[in-house]
Amino acid sequence: MNRNAVYRVAAALASGVIFGLGLSISGMLNPARVRGFLDITRDWDPTLAFVLGGAVIVSAAGLALVRRMPRPLLDDRFYLPETRVIDRRLIVGSAIFGVGWGMVGLCPGPALASLSLGLPATVLFVAAMFAGMAAHDRLQGARPWQRV
């Protein structure tokens, strides 16, 4: 493994640990808190609005930085979305994601981070999530392990 690959793995690991800690500290690993935020008709819990707002600010700053850099530090190019088209697949996928998030109180990042808690419901959710991703890739003929 070359030196650049080691740095990339280390950077990915550090990013994942920081992301998981942030999710844990913010309460995003607690499905009841997430459902409380999403349920605006009953006892609405607005605390996660600050988490989401912070995520938007950090993402916007990161995107602004990326646009000013000629190339990334540990790769030969940036991997950014190549289309801005809002089509049926995007809308349906977003709806499925939102309904699942509302029903279960977990989205993929917090679900993976909360695996560390060892809750059977989370393990089942992650297994179903991976099964759904595999079924999608099989039906679409995608190969997610290949770089574009």
Image: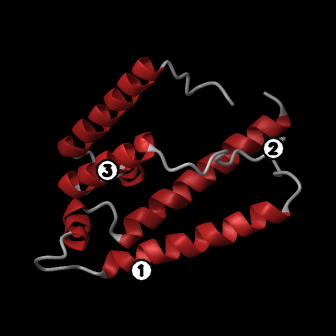
Q: Earlier in the sequence, mark 3 or mark 1?
A: 1
Viewer-nearest of discs 2 and 3? 3
Residue holding disc 1: 50
- Among the 4 quarters of the image, the one containing residue 138: top left
Mark 2: give few (<14), some (14-19) or many (20+) Cα within 10 Å: few
Q: Position of residue 60 (x, y in %)?
A: 63, 70
At 13% from the left and 80% from the top, the residue drawn is 43
Q: Earlier in the sequence, mark 2 or mark 3?
A: 2
Residue holding disc 3: 95
Q: How many marks?
A: 3
Mark 1: give few (<14), some (14-19) or many (20+) Cα within 10 Å: few
Q: Is residue 49 above or below residue 143?
A: below
Give the CA separation, mark 3 to mark 1: 23 Å
Identify the disc placed on residue 113. Answer: none
Looking at the image, the residue that sits furthest to the right is 70
Mark 3: give few (<14), some (14-19) or many (20+) Cα within 10 Å: few
Mark 3–mark 1 contact, CB under 8 Å? no
